[in-house]
Amino acid sequence: MKSVDGGPLRDQAAQLKRLLPWAAGACVLLAAWFGWSGWQQQRDAARRESVTQARDAAVLAAQQGLAAAQKQLGERLASPGLQAALAAGDLAAAGQALGAGWNGAADAAVLPPDLRAEYAALPKSGYGRLGVLESALATGKPAAALIRHGGGTALALAAPARAGGRLAGVAYVRLPLQTVGAGLERAELADGTYLALRQGGFSAIERGDDALAGGAEALAAKVPGSELRVAAAVPDVAGGPLGLGALGCYVAAGLLLLAAGLAWRAPQLLRARAAPGGEGEEPVHTLAETIEHLPSPAKPEPVIQTSAVPAVSPVAATVDAGMFRAYDIRGIVGQNLDAGVAELIGQAIGSLMHEQGHADIVVGRDGRDSGPALSQGLIAGLRKAGRNVIDIGMVPTPVTYFAAYHLRAGSCVSVTGSHNPPDYNGFKIVIGGETLSGDAIVDLHRRIAEGRLHLGDLGTLQQRDVSEDYVQRIASDVQIDRPLKVVVDAGNGVAGDIGPRVLSAIGAEVVPLYCDIDGSFPNHHPDPSEPHNLVDLIKTVQHLDADLGVAFDGDGDRLGVVTRSGENVFPDRLLMLFAADVLERNPGAVILFDVKCTGRLPGHILRHGGSPLMWKTGHSLIKAKMRETDAELAGEMSGHFFFKERWYGFDDGIYAAARLLEILAMQPRTPTETLAALPNGVSTPEIKVAAPGGDPHAFVERFRDRARFEGARLSTIDGLRVDFAEGWGLVRASNTTPVLVMRFDADNADALARIKAAFREQLLALQPDLSLPF
Ligand SMILES: [Zn+2]
């Protein structure tokens, strides 16, 4: 071809000709891409269809298997032989009749409804087994759940055993997993698909490609009448280019091939048209695709270091044993607590860390006047024992817990007197991620008394400020949908600075009340569990026409909430709201609560697809139980809330307030309306009664043995809790003061009066001089 000298038009035409084959090639490649994507989408649709069919068949088979087993259980419970045994109160014979001749059934029994022996035998008796028994009793209906047994998984069934309308016991039987799993095991699965029988976060049976397990909840279907579900997955096929479906992709591929053919033939066509040399138009295909992978933040692991040879300090000293209590160390400054005592405690904690191989520890303190001196003493002792200390200064207790994770120390001490009077102070201790309690705390005292203290090379000390990290960590996850006006009452406690900062950062309009930190607590005690400490907050909320009032205790690990209508929303009702929210994302999750919570709570948790579990009062006991049961959420009547979901599982009043605002802002109703809609009855706050002889544990033990409550369910997890059909009452020993703690709660005022009267009668029968304020 001869290049004609002259015009730019000619040059362009020549250039275009050279580009045309490339354009044709690009079109072919694009066509191949669209074609491939169309084929993938078609295959994906076929797989999806086949796996949903297999899933539905498995759900139906599980439902039928379960229904047949429950029918069997119901028929056996109603049989004359078993009814006679129940009527005679012979539960052993009833259990035998229940299991006799039942193919595959094991461990059949009828248990007394208080489940006392089951709780006493934990963990050997099995949490799963206890959970299903509790669930049958809480709902009054048959319950089923998968449990771990002998290294495998089994189906546990439980149902209330009634004789003539009276609750005589609770029936239990264990059946093979195949009862509900046979259908799934038989299911025919297409290549590259996945099916699983699940309960909560646990997969009992998995079939197919288990690399798909992580995304299987999107196609999960519930097995009606149980907590089980069948999860299913197909490989994640990205949508077609430009969002086209399979058909669209095929059409696009066809058009592109056509374009490729035209581009390929264009030189000939152009040559044919020859001289006029019009401007060719080149189609421009640009395509950019960005895939964003959000890095998931790695969870900091506690630092573990191997321990060296122990050395023992020869000094033995006297420190008041009474300070070493169930959940923390607490003393009165100037009486039994000073910087010297704090140093010994620091060295004892450092010695324990040394033995367990933990090198680093965070120290924070609350706003009390004695804080700086005690903190200094504690730090000196820790460093003496060779520990490296990070001093984060004056912060709420939960910020200290947070720093232990954030700075990867794994251990921390919060120097705090919590909600107690100004002259009190103390220590909350976490070592290697575990909150110290009971014996471990008492053993710190023994170490000091026996001089079993490690003396190492002086540890390092650094100062850090983590408060902004804490605020940002929460604000990056929690943002409220609409602004809420919130009054924050910190009672001049240490949460007064960071509490309002967090709530502002998540989008709330904050009005601070008593938020200047003052260790003499000039306005009221920073204890939101005492209703009279909330009076000013209620007034302020009403006066400013705010949406809500929140109160923190002296060290910020507890939360109190009041509404515009002046209602003090008790923590057990807040826990209902938190549980429903957490369960939306975590079906089947274990939700823990302490024995002081309302009897309406377990039902509420069950209705939202969760597994309620009642446990002993005390923040360190609850945290230990959470780890053991993998619970996503826990709460205590005292106002401690522990979020595992999206947080670290420690009790944090400030974080709980942020989550509360998040939930309330999502509702179309006002916060007052949302909170008022939670199931409610009439209840007393905690009633504290001086224990006879100053020993509440001895009294509670006698009461547990002697008290008689006809037709009620007794639980002895912590004290004696008696659940009637219309409400419940509790008497337990305080672990922190020599008092009996009581609480009563019922559907209505008449029922509450009846329950109080029943308790009064039983309490006075045991101890006529007990002064009861009800
Ligand atoms: Zn506290």
Image (cartoon, rainbow, N blue to C red):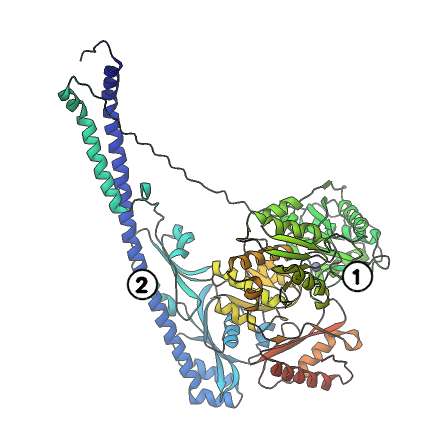
Name which residue type carries label 1: Pro
Asked which secondary structure carries label 2, the reply is: helix
Q: Residue furthest left?
A: 272
The quadrant of the picture showing ligand 1 is: bottom right
Viewer-nearest residue: 267 or 605: 267
In the picture, the disc for residue 421 is 1
Q: Quadrant of the C terminus?
A: bottom right
Q: Is residue 662 above or below residue 284?
A: below
Which quarter of the picture shows residue 526?
A: bottom right
Q: Looking at the image, which residue is at 69% across and 86% down?
A: 761
Q: Looking at the image, which residue is at 66% across and 75% down?
A: 684
Relative to 337, 573 lies left or right: left
**Label 1–label 2 contact, CB within 8 A:** no
Name which residue type carries label 2: Arg
Q: Residues within 10 Å of mark 1 (few under 14, many from 20)?
A: some
Viewer-nearest residue: 617 or 194: 617
Q: Which residue is mark 2?
A: 186
- Report if the beta carbon of the residue with label 2 is closer than 8 angstroms to ligand 1: no
Relative image position of residue 569 (x, y in whole percent): 62, 67
In the picture, the disc for residue 401 is none
Q: Is residue 629 above or below residue 101?
A: above
Q: Residues within 10 Å of mark 2 (few under 14, many from 20)?
A: few
Residue 722 visible in the shown view: no
Which quarter of the picture shows residue 691?
A: bottom right
